[in-house]
Image: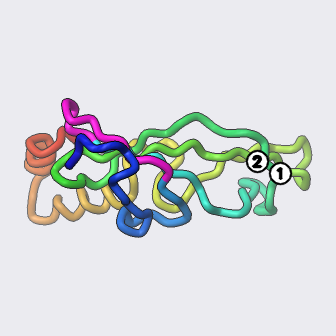
Amino acid sequence: MFGTPSGSLNITAELLGLSDVKVLDVRTNLSAREITIAVESTRKHILCRKCGEPTKPHGLGRKLRLRHLPMFGKETIIEIIPRRGRCEHCDGGSTTTEILDWYDAKGKLTKPLEHHLLFELVNSTVADVSRKADDRLSYC
């Protein structure tokens, strides 16, 4: 099932609970018990972080590897290379890196995984949640 070519697993962005992306590739690493899903943004424009106006395309940022909710008992990693834009409306032509709604700019986890871990904390301790997550997939 997981040793098949990457094109045979058909996973949609809706199934992942991620907005404004399309799935490009799904890779599995059986020895690491990991599923890596490459996605790209489907947003039409990158909005300037200063003035909020649409920017002109200006290359790509660095690849982000974000931990996501586990799938099929395996650690799931979402890979995205955010687009960059240069604003023609701001003085100095400020650049902006696209940030989608489901992750924080400097975060290592997707927001759905953060919410899941916070939900696990209800009536538990941080140590219990960390231990339980570590037993499953070595999250924390």
Q: Looking at the image, is 84 positioned above or below residue 32?
A: below
Residue in front for this viewpoint, 91 or 138: 138
Q: Where is residue 93 in the image (x, y as percent from the top left)?
A: 87, 44
Position of the C terminus, as image quadrant, is: top left
Q: In this view, does 32 lie to the left or right of 48?
A: left
- The secondary structure that most of the magenta stretch takes on is strand
Magenta part of the chain: 24-34
Q: Looking at the image, is 131 positioned above or below residue 21?
A: above
Residue, x 40% and y 42% (percent of image)?
108
Point out the tag, 1 or 2, that comes first from the N-terminus. Answer: 1
Residue in front for this viewpoint, 72 or 48: 72
Which color mode does the image show? rainbow
Instruction: Label 1, secondary structure: give it.
Output: strand
Q: Is residue 140 left or right of residue 49?
A: left
- Is 27 magenta? The answer is yes
Q: Do the residues labelled 1 and 2 touch (CB within 8 Å)?
A: yes
Mark 2 burial class by Cα count in 10 Å: few <14, some 14-19, many 20+: many
Q: Position of residue 110 (x, y in %)?
A: 39, 53
- The image's mark for residue 56 is 1
Q: Is residue 38 left or right of residue 136?
A: right
Instruction: Label 2, secondary structure: give it.
Output: strand
Q: Mark 2 points at which residue?
A: 85
